[in-house]
Image: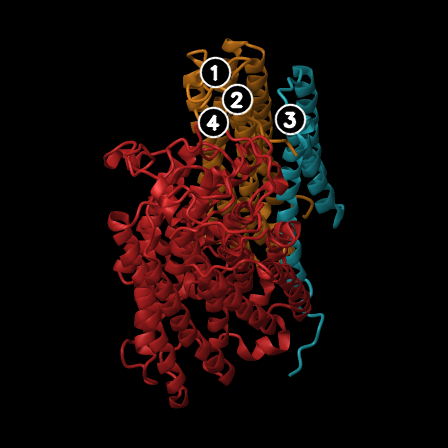
Chain colours: A cyan, B red, C orange
Amino acid sequence: MAQHVVPPKVYFAVFTALIVLTATTTAISFLNLGPWNTVVALGIAFVKATLVALFFMHVKYSPRLTQIVVAGGLFWLAILIAFTLSDFMTRGWLPISR
Amino acid sequence: MSSAAIAPLPSEHPVEPRVNYLNATYGVKSWLLTRDHKRIALLYLASITFFFFLGGLFALLIRLELLTPAGDLVQSQTYNKLFTMHGVIMVFFFLIPSIPAVLGNFLIPMMIGAKDLAFPRLNLLSWYIYMVGATFTLWAVVHGGVDTGWTFYTPYSTASSNTHVVATAVGIFITGFSSILTGLNFIVTIHTMRAPGLTWFRLPLFVWSHYATSLIFVLATPVIAVTLLMVAVERLFHFGIFDPRLGGDPILFQHLFWFYSHPAVYIMVLPAMGVVSELVTTFSRKNIFGYKFVAFASIGIAVLGFLVWGHHMFVSGQSVYAGMIFSLLSFLVAIPSAVKVFNWTATMYKGSISYRTPMLYAFGFIGLFTIGGLTGLFLATLGVDVHVHDTYFIVAHFHYIMVGGAIMGYLGGIHYWWPKISGKLYPEAWARFAALVVFLGFNLTFFPQFILGYLGMPRRYHAYPPEFQVLNVMSTAGASILGVGYLMPMVYLVWSMRYGKAAPANPWGSTGLEWDTPSPPPTENFPVTPVVTDEPYHYSPGEVEVVG
Amino acid sequence: MAEARGPAAGAAPAAHAGPRELQHHFDTMEQQRDASSLGMWVFLVTEILFFGGLFLAYTVYRSQYARAFAEASRHLDISLGTFNTAVLIVSSLTMALAVFSASTGRRRAVLVFLLATMALGGVFLGVKAVEYGHKFHDHLVPGLHFRFPGPYARQAEIFYSLYFAMTGLHAAHMVIGIGLLTALVLQARKGRYGPDYYTPVEVSGLYWHFVDIVWIFLFPLLYLIGRHLH
């Protein structure tokens, strides 16, 4: 693990971005964007999470192995959700013979 | 210092008292507060052996009931408790920890030339966590058990069953963290503590298969943990996550449950495959055929194993479309397993085979796992599964893998490394005889169950139509023989601890760093960190004296 | 892939030359640090899957009962939720600054930032307790005389089951995090953490940031889905 020291000004910049994004997501939630509400809210959440991971958790400065571990964990969660949803969302698609 | 290939004859080994991990310190505290991975392995050995025989006791009661077509030994709810407790105990408290927590703990540091695992205190903690979880479950057993099946399907488990679901679920939840810590420990150890020169492709295949298993430990176990937590919370606080009356979906539970429980079967079989790779190479005195194929097949099984869980849910109401995807993926996961079987066979071809007890178990594994695996393909076929789901065909299938496969691998490994672990040789004649008894007993128990299932006998019923009795009697007879076969090692292994011949460092003439240490090894394993220059399984053709 | 490390054959065995923090089974501090860091990251992956099960349940039911979930979500206090989100973000900042301070030898600052992080965690939990109190008062706790006006009462009970399960699990992790910080504070008071050894601060920071990330997702999914409905 690189003993990389991140200068505080990076932290403060990320912090500011996180606060702004939080205010934004709360404000936008009052606007009716139809299905886009969810997309925007989740999108902002992903950006915030990525900022925390890359800079606060030093993933940007970490060895490749760490980055693979993080990506792997997220990918596995995606498998759980995607495959399960593939059941729920296709329940009516194929007729079952009576 | 690289691995030796020739073992000295016993007469060259004076038997003098020597400090090793067993006698380095004395007293109960020195065992209960140990950080030595080898002692922790023995703590686990004691615990899982107890649970093996407890689970076996429930199996015995099940088979006694099934001697007659009528449900005349126990009531139906009691019978439900019997098969539930049998499943819960055997899966969570015996099979899942067995090889990793005993053999993996003991051997992985030694196989990579390290003094211990990366986190020795977490290792000890994982055993204590196991014991706490086991206590919850034992409490449930003593107070009347659980009758939901080891699968805990909702809404029966959350809303209807009046048995100790919460205690059992909490027990399994807690024990799950024991698995997680073990897997975490193995992954970090293998990444960061290999000896100089020990590249990934010089690792013994036992290490590869445990690495793959550890990936499953850390990725799958948390899901069952949170799922059982949801079941417990729903029962205790009447939350409504799976409650159909509120719009909850019981199939959601099944998705969450099987996301873990299918990979769990690979947790149970991958370590055994790792053992078999070691046994086949040693007792054929030959390098493994296709090392990289076997190594990558382990990873492939672990990864693909996560994509097939819906094959347990073909008739549950799951979307047929999703069922087709799961069916196709289930066929694919058979491929890396088959690759391993081919490679073990090719390893033996033109090898110098010796029929020691561990090799007998390896043969048993290869044959019985193949049968179990092939019947798995029948089950992956949607049309066939509709007919045999929830019949004895399924029961036979998974027992061929779990017992014919995993337990044989476990016993083979215990015998193979027994000299290293205990410093003693077990009596070979008795051990071979026991292996034979186990093999015959196993097949008599479970082969008739394939036929019963195919003929339509459902599982989890304590009564059945009279025309199934003959096959059931055969199965029960087999189970008694199998039980005797399992008791025999208990007797002679314990006997050998006191009266067995002293074992040399390398009784089998095997390659591998663990055989470079005395039997039993010192606490720190290697006084000097070894440097590895050889490929694994670098057997040279020619005569080598194999002791024992 | 990092190669294995260790002294060459024939190097002096047994007696471990090295700082007192070097555990006996490791050969170098760097190896120990790498192991600790990888260990915490693997543990965080298990936490992703642990929370993931609940996120799956949420996703499935939200996709099936979108309207009911939106209605139910409106009864959560968006101001308290937003405030709490900000609190955790500040606490992540203070935690990152604690790690920075340790790595640059500012031992007093380490203590200050760790205590600040703990305090902010405490604030978060206090606000959550207030929110839970409100829900109890409004009969929105499932299984406890749950009452929800309108046609979506049953699915709203599922929403609140998930709300309590997910925020409850998150809060439990916060409590554990505060426990970790307490242990760190006790060591930091003795000046234990400096540029040559601050791994415990670093890996505890990873845990704390992870718990923050979980909340970053919980907040919009639980609080923000029904605000645009009237």
Q: Residue B351 in the image: x percent, y percent? A: 57, 58
Residue depicted at x 37% and y 59%: B89
Q: CA distance from mark 2 to mark 4?
A: 14 Å
Disc assigned to residue B458: none
Q: Does the residue at mark 1 contact the one at mark 2 (Cβ under 8 Å)?
A: yes
Disc assigned to residue B528: 4
Instruction: Residue type at mark 3: give it.
Output: His
Q: Secondary structure at mark 2?
A: loop
Q: CA distance from mark 1 to mark 4?
A: 16 Å
User: Dot 2, how many residues are within 10 Å of its Cα: few (below 14), some (14-19), or many (20+)?
Assistant: some
Instruction: Residue type at mark 2: give it.
Output: Thr
Chain assignment, label 2: C
Instruction: Residue type at mark 1: give it.
Output: Gly
**Tag 1 residue:** C18
User: Dot 3, how many residues are within 10 Å of its Cα: few (below 14), some (14-19), or many (20+)?
Assistant: many
Disc nearest the viewer among 1 and 4: 4
User: Dot 4, how many residues are within 10 Å of its Cα: few (below 14), some (14-19), or many (20+)?
Assistant: many
Q: Residue B287 in the image: x percent, y percent? A: 59, 51
**Tag 3 residue:** A58
Q: Nearer the viewer, residue C67 or B412?
A: B412
Q: Does the residue at mark 2 contact the one at mark 3 (Cβ under 8 Å)?
A: no
Chain assignment, label 1: C
Q: CA distance from mark 3 to mark 1?
A: 27 Å
Disc nearest the viewer among 3 and 4: 4
**Tag 2 residue:** C28
Quadrant location of the N terminus of chain C in the rendered image = top right
Instruction: Residue type at mark 4: give it.
Output: Val
Establish whether labels 1 and 2 are both on one chain: yes
Q: CA distance from mark 3 to mark 4?
A: 35 Å
Q: Secondary structure at mark 4?
A: loop
Say above or below: C194 vs B83: above
